[in-house]
């Protein structure tokens, strides 16, 4: 039998970032703990192992983010462990869950309708002028990349007139995390400009708070702990970038999957409530973030190997969400699969009854605080689009790219045409 080998140089190729899943299957099947000496990482790719690693605060630390995220955003709660993380999260997290989400629903509805109206108005104008007999839209630029930023701007109480400025900053800041040295430099510059923009607002709202999120963070206190000015600015950066990027990719990928699976899209057209399941399956099969990394602070024993203290572990969300040990036919998009939990996400991985949840929001204490907001934006936005666009389909010869997070992904596009209704 021929021995199976794996070349980590593939991680630096466009081929990998276009379709990482076959390569990660090799790791899952033959090297479930893989030491990538070229990049200095230990890859963990099976679902159960990734779940356990996410929830393990004894052997792993998120201090590694000080070497990446902190350089671009400043110090956020994600870089802290233990009490420092808990006190910051306890201030922020309640604003994104439960009844406190209620005031955000009208914000999502308004911004969704504004974008949809713009799309349909442009289509109607072209139709009236005889330039086209159908509507056309590039959905990423016109909708999915704009909705989450507009919602976050309103949440923070920032003026919508500066939307184009924020829309320029957030992808540059995101690219600064994983891109070239030039992209990192520009990402840092954009974050500094964003911090300068909201610096005065933090001062003003500390004295005269309103109902916006910045005001709430300025005045919130849990067990005597409050966020510093730098904490608030860094969290605002994180919210703009992580919240914008996650929801942008989720909405775009949801619609690409619908275009590629017309039978399932037909079911969604009959019952738009199924967009909730579309979101969940999209977060499984094409999660916006493909991995998280952690510093190893205690030796980890796994599959007869030891990850030493000081090493960096790579938790592969891409790999875990495609694990055949958990999901039947994991590379197939299926909103009716019975091996995936389709309810609201929890931090645990597995749910009562043994169903597995997707890992697109992480797990454990660093589970994404904005998970409920992302789902609401994606589902509500998609329902509104479906209602406004008659028979949406990919434009003949048009692009329909799944967005895969990474330094070499293509410029995302989803070129649709639709009947004006």
Image (cartoon, rainbow, N blue to C red):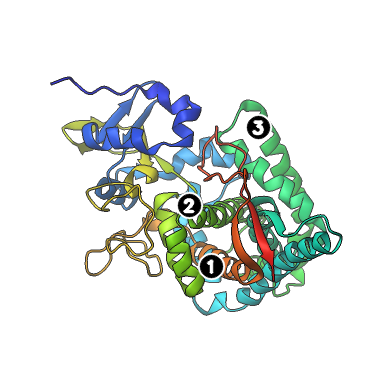
Q: From the viewer's side, name the closer residue of 103 and 227.
A: 103
Mark 3 residue element: helix
Point out the tag, 1 or 2, that comes first from the N-terminus: 2
Identify residue for label 3: 183
* Residue at 35% across, 47% down: 331
Q: How many marks?
A: 3
Q: Residues within 10 Å of mark 2 (few under 14, many from 20)?
A: some
As drawn, the label of residue 379 is 1
Q: Position of residue 67 (x, y in %)?
A: 52, 35
Q: Earlier in the sequence, mark 3 or mark 1?
A: 3
- Mark 1 → mark 2, Cα distance in angstroms: 18 Å
Q: Are marks 3 and 2 in contact (CB under 8 Å)?
A: no
Residue drawn 70% across the image and 75% down it: 211
The residue identified by callout 2 is 260
Q: Position of residue 24 (x, y in %)?
A: 33, 36
SS for callout 1: helix
Give the number of the mark in front: 3 or 2. 2
Say whether residue 132 is left or right of residue 322.
right
Query: Residue 221: image x %, image y %?
Result: 57, 70
Drawn side of residue 116 relative to residue 316, left or right: right
Q: Is residue 134 above or below residue 54?
A: below
Residue furthest out toward the right: 129
What whole-number distance in Å separates the C-alpha atoms at marks 3 and 2?
33 Å
Is 376 placed left or right of 315 in the picture? right
User: Residue 230: where, in percent of width, then height?
Assistant: 65, 52
Q: Dot 2 lies on which element?
A: helix
Q: Residues within 10 Å of mark 3 (few under 14, many from 20)?
A: some
Q: Is residue 39 visible?
A: no
In the rendered view, tell whether residue 229 sits above or below residue 189.
below
């Amino acid at each position: 039998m021929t021995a199976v080998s794996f070349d980590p140089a593939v991680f630096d190729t466009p081929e990998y970032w276009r379709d990482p899943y076959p390569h990660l299957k090799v790791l899952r099947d033959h090297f479930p703990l893989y030491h990538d000496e070229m990049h200095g990482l230990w890859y963990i790719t099976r679902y159960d192992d990734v779940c356990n690693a996410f929830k393990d605060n004894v052997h792993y630390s998120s201090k590694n983010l000080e070497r990446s995220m902190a350089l671009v955003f400043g110090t956020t709660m994600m870089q802290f462990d233990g009490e420092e993380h808990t006190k910051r999260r306890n201030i922020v997290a309640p604003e994104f869950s439960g009844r406190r989400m209620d005031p955000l629903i009208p914000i999502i509805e308004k911004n969704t309708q504004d974008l949809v109206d713009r799309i349909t108005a442009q289509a109607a104008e072209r139709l009236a002028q005889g330039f086209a007999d159908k509507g056309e839209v590039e959905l990423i630029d016109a909708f999915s990349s704009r909705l989450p930023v507009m919602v976050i701007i309103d949440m923070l109480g920032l003026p919508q007139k500066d939307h184009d400025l924020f829309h320029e900053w957030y992808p540059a800041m995101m690219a600064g995390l994983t891109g070239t040295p030039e992209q990192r430099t520009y990402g840092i510059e954009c974050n500094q400009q964003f911090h300068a923009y909201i610096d005065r607002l933090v001062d003003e709202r500390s004295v005269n708070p309103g109902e916006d999120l910045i005001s709430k963070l300025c005045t919130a206190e849990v067990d005597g702990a409050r966020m510093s000015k730098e904490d608030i600015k860094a969290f605002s950066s994180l919210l703009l970038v992580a919240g914008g990027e996650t929801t942008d990719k989720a909405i775009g990928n949801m619609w690409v999957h619908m275009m590629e699976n017309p039978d399932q899209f037909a079911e969604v057209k009959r019952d738009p409530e199924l967009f909730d399941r579309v979101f969940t399956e999209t977060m499984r099969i094409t999660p916006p973030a493909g991995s998280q990394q952690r510093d190893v602070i205690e030796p980890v024993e796994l599959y007869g190997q030891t990850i030493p203290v000081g090493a960096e572990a790579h938790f592969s969300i891409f790999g875990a969400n495609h694990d055949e040990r958990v999901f039947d036919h994991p590379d197939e998009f299926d909103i009716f699969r019975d091996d995936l939990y389709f309810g609201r996400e929890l931090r645990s991985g597995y749910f009562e009854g043994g169903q597995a949840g997707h890992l697109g929001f992480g797990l454990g204490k660093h589970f994404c605080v904005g998970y409920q907001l992302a789902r609401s934006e994606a589902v509500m936005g998609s329902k509104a689009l479906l209602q406004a666009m008659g028979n949406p389909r990919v434009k003949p010869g048009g692009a329909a790219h799944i967005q895969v997070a990474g330094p070499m992904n293509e410029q995302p596009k989803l070129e649709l045409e639709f009947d004006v209704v």
